[in-house]
Image (tube, rainbow, N blue to C red):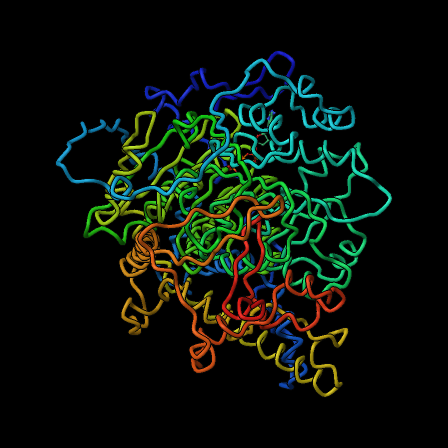
Amino acid sequence: METFVDQRGFVRTIDDSEDVPVLDESSDSEEETVSVQQQKKKKKKKAASAFNPGFSLFKQFDEAIPFHDDIALKTAKKKAASTLDEKIQKMRKMKKRDPTLNPDSEQYEMEIDEEEDEEEEMAPDTIKTKDKKKKKRKGKQTQEEIEEPVKQEFADSIDSYDSKLNFQDMKISRPLMKGLATLQFEKPTPIQAACIPVALRGRDLCACAVTGSGKTVAFMLPILERLLYRPVQQACTRVLILVPTRELAVQVHQVGRQLGQFSNVDICLAAGGLDLKSQEAALRMGPDIVVATPGRLIDHLHNSPNFNLNSVEILVLDEADRMLDEYFAEQMKEIIRLCNFQRQTMLFSATMTDEVRFWMCNDLAAVSLKDPVKVFVNQNTDIALGLRQEFIRIRENREGDREAIVAALVTRTFCDKCIVFLQTKVQAHRLHVVLGLLGVNVGELHGNLSQAQRLEALQKFKDNSVDVLLATDLASRGLDIEGVKTVINFTMPNTLKHYVHRVGRTARAGKAGRSVTLVGEKERKMLKEVVKHAKTPLKSRIVPPEVVEHFRNQIADMEEDIATIEREEREERQLRALENQTNKAQRLLDGDPNGVDGMKRVWFQTHKDRMAEKEALRLGEYNKDNKGRNRKEKLSAEDRAKFEVEKAQLYAQRVSKRKFKPKRLRACAEDDNEETGPPAKKKKNKKPKRFSFDEELTKTDQRSVRKFRAGPSFKERQLMGAQENLFKNRRGTREGDDVICGVQVFTASSQSAYK
Ligand SMILES: Nc1ncnc2c1ncn2[C@@H]1O[C@H](COP(=O)(O)OP(=O)(O)OP(=O)(O)O)[C@@H](O)[C@H]1O
């Protein structure tokens, strides 16, 4: 793959006017032959290293272990030490060593030695360029066209930038220039050139630029620059950066630290899954910048003494459209409620156009911006021009071939630096076993893993000890992994936006990359959307039927081994659950029901509320159909693939329903004054909602109780002078809608309290 490297070895950035070298069509067959050869060399290497003479399969059963609870737990620990990869290796070696264990077991032998010859005879994939069909206007409008956009009003709009501008021209201070030099950033990218001067002026902004265009530096650099001039007498948190995933938080934190390494700005990470106590200690010191995921941040806000957001001067929402979608809605409301409203707010994402109109009319009007500047560079594309997009058609009755096709792709053509995106964690895990048994060096990254496992999987993929990473949408946003060559979509992503982010993991910072998406008949609508948005020609790839059949047979032969591995894992999980229960019981006996320090952690929602929210957001269950009936005990390849597609479609349906749902009006403006800004415009022809006192008293359903009888909000308590009690008894105040960004939002209870 070609990269842009200038004479001085710096990674150059791409200008709007430049042509990006898309992978040459004529190179297809040559490229793939080379790839197959490389794969074969690799396989030989793997075959050589696959056998460890010291390995004893039954070693763990050598000693007779008497059954005893305690020992069972110890065994659980011991068993848990055997990772999935170890299990896969064990199975492969077992089959290799003792063919009598399974009459079909030549499969692994064949794969290591003889299959090479067989594959040599197999035809390479065929690639055709997809022609863009001419637009037919049937007088039928698309959903986007039908929708009447409620647009955010922008005070200014920037859609071009000064391509000659460099970091010196922006008056970036010396310590940060040194940081930029260490990162070898010579020249700002377009989004940086456009955003940094605006952000330095303290203006609110809403920025959108293609994936991999350097948005992180676009907000981090002006933040650090402004913090260099902060008063240092009193340490407090002045900047809050919110991101949707823990991995992204780690990455943003790292970029901040690298950029600010020669300054005295203190950055703290408050992401879920990482050590709570050390985060608490760091937050107590009042770090200048906090990079956080919403859930963990709320936990700290409610449970860490001396940590609050009262002094936050800059709020950044990275992947803003995700942060403001329904999944984070309740948590974001809570954070915004606790955040100082006199602040600069910056929103960044690669896919924002659609969302902007949302924010103004949904519950999250709270993050509305003050005279915001819209910075949309490269507006004509959200997909990198260096990306080559390929599609593989899956015929209606061949849905079950998806696993075989992906196996063919990653073993024959895209053998390294490849991310495969799947819709469900279960399918990602299964594919780990399948590809592992086929000898692929594979890792998985999704929400069913512990944080340590997640970070380890990512690290292994980054440092090339894993060639193929199987991930859910957890990894689709923001992650910047150097040198990702290929992104494979097992099914068409939920929405165009998901597609843009997934394929955006490759072809970053002006480099070339490739995406391969498997498209079934039911997913053709989404494909049309992608075709409509494409700025470069799309390709259609055909994997030869004999290759698909070969892998399909191999996978079918492995089913028994897959079941064995899954059974072992299930047993380990049960033992771990038993261990957890025993530990819990032990803690109860010791009189410490809540953990090490005996403090019960509080959360703004009750456990029941949280579970109800999760349940409402759930998109079907793996072994239940969409009517809630149990699926068959043993799912076929078709069933699994169908569920993946179904799940994506359920999500897309929900998004589209939400777009059409009438929005609740909850805000009313205060008097026009400096603090609160101008009053909101009165809606014509809309009867004001009336709250009756009787209603407040008599309505006892849960929603009304929350709506009418919520306690005073943060601001109201402040007004009442109860500052010291702010962190006590926060539960029950979540609907205490309050003063946010100049708009005062009253609940009925607060209205009557003020009357
Ligand atoms: N000025 C620069 N010069 C060269 N490379 C840069 C520059 N700024 C950022 N990069 C590199 O570009 C890559 C992408 O940056 P970043 O992750 O911030 O992109 P992004 O726009 O946030 O992507 P996404 O939309 O996927 O979140 C990173 O590897 C980063 O190091």
Above-or-below relation of 469 to 172: below
Q: Which of 274 and 159 is in front in this view?
A: 159
Q: In this view, does 491 lie above or below 119?
A: below
Q: Can residue 78 be seen in this view?
A: yes
Q: In which quarter of the image is residue 126?
A: top left
Which residue is painted at 15% across and 31% down in the image? 136
Query: Percent x, y for residue 305?
Result: 76, 63
Q: Where is residue 330 in the image (x, y as percent from the top left)?
A: 51, 61
Which residue is at the far bottom?
589
Count how many numbered circles sit on residues in the image. 0
User: Which of 256/708 is in front?
Assistant: 708
Of all residues, the one furthest to the left in this rendering is 138
Write the residue at 45% across / 37% down: 153
Camera-nearest residue between 94 and 169? 169
Task: Say if residue 48 shows up in the picture.
Answer: no
The percent coordinates of residue 345 (x first, y second) are 59, 42
Ligand 1 quadrant assignment: top right
Q: Where 178 sits versus 748, above or below?
A: above
* Closer-to-camera residue (674/79): 674
Kindly give the residue lying farthest to the right in the view shown.
233
Instruction: Determine whether, in the image, residue 108 is placed left or right of residue 236.
Output: left
Q: Where is residue 657 in the image (x, y as percent from the top left)?
A: 30, 55
Please state if 706 lies on the left or on the right of 74 as rendered: left
Kindly identify the residue that appears in the image at 53 percent across and 74 percent down: 709
